[in-house]
Structures are given as structure tokens and as C-alpha cells.
Amino acid sequence: MNKQIQVKNPKTMAFILMLGAFLGLFSETALNMALTNIMEEYTITAGTAQWLTTGYLLVLAILVPITALLMKWYTTRQLVIGGLVISLFGGILAALSPSFTILLLGRIIQAIGTGLILPVMTTVLLIIFPVHKRGTVMGLMGLVITLAPALGPTLSGLIISALDWPYIFWISSLLYVLLTFYAIAKISNVSEITKPKIDFVSILFSTVGFGGLIFALSTMAEEPFSSPKVWGTLVAGIIALILFSARQLTMKQPMVNLRVFKYPMFTLGTLMMFLGILVILSTAILLPLYLKGSLLFTAVVAGLILLPGNAVNFILSPIVGTLFDKWGPRVFVITGSIILVIGNIIFTTVISSQTPIWQIIVAFMVLFFGLTMVMMPSQTNALNQLPRPLYADGSAAMNTLNQVAGAAGTAIAITVFTSGQSGYLISFPDASEPEFLAAGVKYAFYFITGISVVGLICSFFVKRPGVSENAAKVTVEEIVSVRN
């Protein structure tokens, strides 16, 4: 069940998939450093501007579970090349956008392309590499998942300062062109085409469920919870998700096989990933606003301030991946969770309109030191417990929840940030803009710290699943249903 498929150039395929995913995940946060510029250019509020990030993540959350079904209808080459071409089109449209609406449309199209590539990457890497090499491979994939959205504000800050924010899209579009031609030449087909029946009711429930949930959380930044636009869409989303889950558990050929959550380490690892993505995306949208709006740094300086933390992630990820094969997940996940809590406590302690910059740099480095030790081991350990017939479903479930986490984290962070500013202005009505903006960011970091504490509690239950456990827990009926 866990035997890999032999391909001519597995490392080349891995490179193409990881770079494609990197560009897509980089796009999640690439505009965060440009939000103040975009808000000024289009005369919009922070709550509206955050839809450029939240909308992107919302589309991913809707599309990723559908991609699990598409992988059984279309070849690996079709999905990868199609995803790259769609992302390219979205990037060009966003670069040429004459209005905020067209810019948001370009972002949505970009997200569709990324939503095709992400689940394919995870599933293919699990298939083409043997179990004993997964720690190293998943370490590199973990680097992509964490570094890309974290590096978005840094690289975009450099681009904005040297050129202008539309060049974020022009540069990524150029890379998509080059990568598309490389993919045409090198990507092999490794997926098994079974063409199961398409259940449009499941697609409807999934779309309404995830869409309603994220829309409600995002709208809370500008509307009170008593607004029907908030509670109405939230209730509709929750009901749709309950119906979606119930339907998947009763279907012989589910769109997303929720039986993957019968595996305790997969469930726990997915939860750890969910919490980690919440922290990453919340931080990625808050810190650029803080550095530019409160500490009054330029985009390029603000980007460079975040660079040491990204460097920690870049250096540590492959090391953790290599050592994971020898040491297992527990030591990394527990230690990393403790460090993550410490990093967030530092942020809640030092953030103000007068904070010395070295304190922000140190806090961000500590934060990513912990995140790097948590993310890859959690993901690899989770997927290692699944038998091969459930790889695609496990990948789809995990990636879907990761995108929901990113969208929810971004939306809640902006909502808490806005609430923190309002509360501070009530207490200090004469406060300057840098002061109440810093207060809002500090308030939001209390939320992020709470999330990291939940992750720390979960980390104590992580253990490495045995091979026999993998084989024993999948039933014949489950394997047959997935293969058909």
C-alpha cells in the first residue's frame, strides 16, 4: 500500500510542483505589504482591502476538496499545467486592473490555479518517494508551505519600493510562463484515473459551507455580529458543512473521504497544521500594517525587518526534515510549540508605537523558529499514518483546512485588530494614528497567543504511528470505495 510509483525524474517533478505551490502560496500574502498603497489608490478601508487576501484563501478553501475529485478525472499533467496557466492569466489580469473589482477578480482566478496545484503536490510527493525519504521531502514541502506566505511581505516590499505593486503580478507571471514550459517537458502522469460519479450536491454543500463561514468571519471586520450578513451567512455555512460531512460519511464514493479522520495522528497533525497556518497568516497581515502604519517604515525596510525570521525558516526546515526520519515528530512538535508561545508572548509584551526594531526582529525569529519545528513534523506524521489509497483524500482534507485556517486567521486578525483600535480610541480619544494602530495589532496578538497555547496543549499528544497501525486501520471497504 505504501510502495512508491517509479518516475524518471522524481526530483524534477518535485521541484516543479514545489515551485508552482510556492508561487501560489506566496501570492496569498504578497499584497499585504501593498495594502496601504491599494487602500489609498482605490479609496477603500482595511476591512475591504483584506478581501484581496481573504478572498484568495476563500477560493482555495472551496476548490481544494473539489480538486481531490478532479484528480480522479484528470491526469497529473493536465492538472499541473492547467493550474499554472490559470494562475498566469489571473496574475496578468491583476497586474492590468483598472479598479479594485478587477484586481480582486484577478486574485480569485490566481487562487483557482493554486487550488489545482496544492493537493496534487502533496499527493504526488507521497507517491513518488519511499517512506524512508519522506521526512526530507516533506521538510522541503513544509519549507514551501511556511516560507512562501511568510516571505510574501518581504519580497513584495522590495518590489513595491523599487517599482510598484502591479509588478508583484508581472514578476510572478513571468515565472509562471517559464515554469509552464518546464512542466510541459518534465511532468509525468502518476495519478490513477477512475472517473467516479460527480456529486453536485456535495460540491454545493462544500461551497456554501466554506464560503459562508469565511465570508461571515471576514465581514465581521466592518459589520456587527447582529448583522444578518454576518450571523446569517455563518449559520448557513455551519449547516452546509454539517450536511456536507454527513453526506460524505454515507456515500460509497465521497468527494472527500472523511474516514481519514479515523486515524488519530492524522487528525491531530491536521489540527496542528491548522493552528500553525492561523498563526502564519494572521502575523503576515498584521506585521506589515504595524511596521508601515505605526513604526512608519517604508515597504522595503519593513520587508527586510521580516527577512531574518524567514531565514530561520529557510535554514531550519531541511534540518528538521532530515532529523525527523531519525527522531520522529514528538521532540520537534513539543519543543517548537513552547518556542512558538514564547515568540507570541514577546510580541504581546513589546508592541507599541515606539518599539525598538531589534525587538520585533527577535520576536519574529523566535516565532518562526517554533513554527518550523511544528509544521513539517505535524504534516509528515499525519500523512504517514494513512495507507496509500487515502493519500489523495488526506491531502485534500488537510489542504482544505489549511486554506480555511489561513482565511479565518486573516479575517479574525483584522476583526480583532479593528476592535482593538476602537477600544483604544474610546479610552484615549486623542491618540495618534501610530498609537491606536499599534494598540490594535497588540490586541490581535493576544488572539494569536491564545491559538499558540492551544497548539502547545495538543503537542503533548503527538506520537509516531507504527507501520502495523497503518495497515490495520484501513478496511477493505474503504480501500475499494476509494479506488472505485
Image (cartoon, helix red, strand yellow):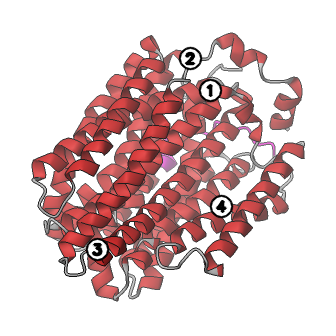
Query: How far across and down, in percent of the image, does residue 461 sit?
Result: 56, 24
Say if 330 sits above or below 350 in the image.
above
Say if 228 sits above or below 285 in the image.
below
Q: How many marks?
A: 4
Mark 1, secondary structure of its residue: helix
Mark 3, secondary structure of its residue: helix
Residue at (66, 80) in percent of width and height: 228
Dot label at residue 210: 4
In the image, 132 versus 222, the foreground residue is 222
Residue kind at label 1, given as amino acid type? Met
Q: Cα distance, mark 3 to mark 2?
A: 50 Å
Dot label at residue 265: 1
Give left or right: position of 333 versus 32. Answer: right
In the image, 92 versus 252, the foreground residue is 252
Say if 182 sits above or below 323 in the image.
below
Q: Cα distance, mark 1 to mark 2?
A: 8 Å
Give left or right: position of 30 versus 162. Answer: right
Residue stretch rendered in magenta on the structure:
183-194
Q: Cα distance, mark 3 to mark 4?
A: 37 Å
Say if 229 sits above or below 159 in the image.
below
Residue kind at label 3, given as amino acid type? Ser
Closer to the chain start, of discs 3 and 2, is: 3
Closer to the chain start, of discs 1 and 3, is: 1
Circle 2 is placed at which residue position? 464
CB atoms of marks 1 and 2 within 8 Å: yes
Residue at (19, 68) in percent of width and height: 294
Q: Cα distance, mark 4 to mark 2?
A: 31 Å
Q: Is residue 190 magenta?
A: yes
Magenta stretch, main secondary structure class: loop
In the image, 21 versus 431, the foreground residue is 431
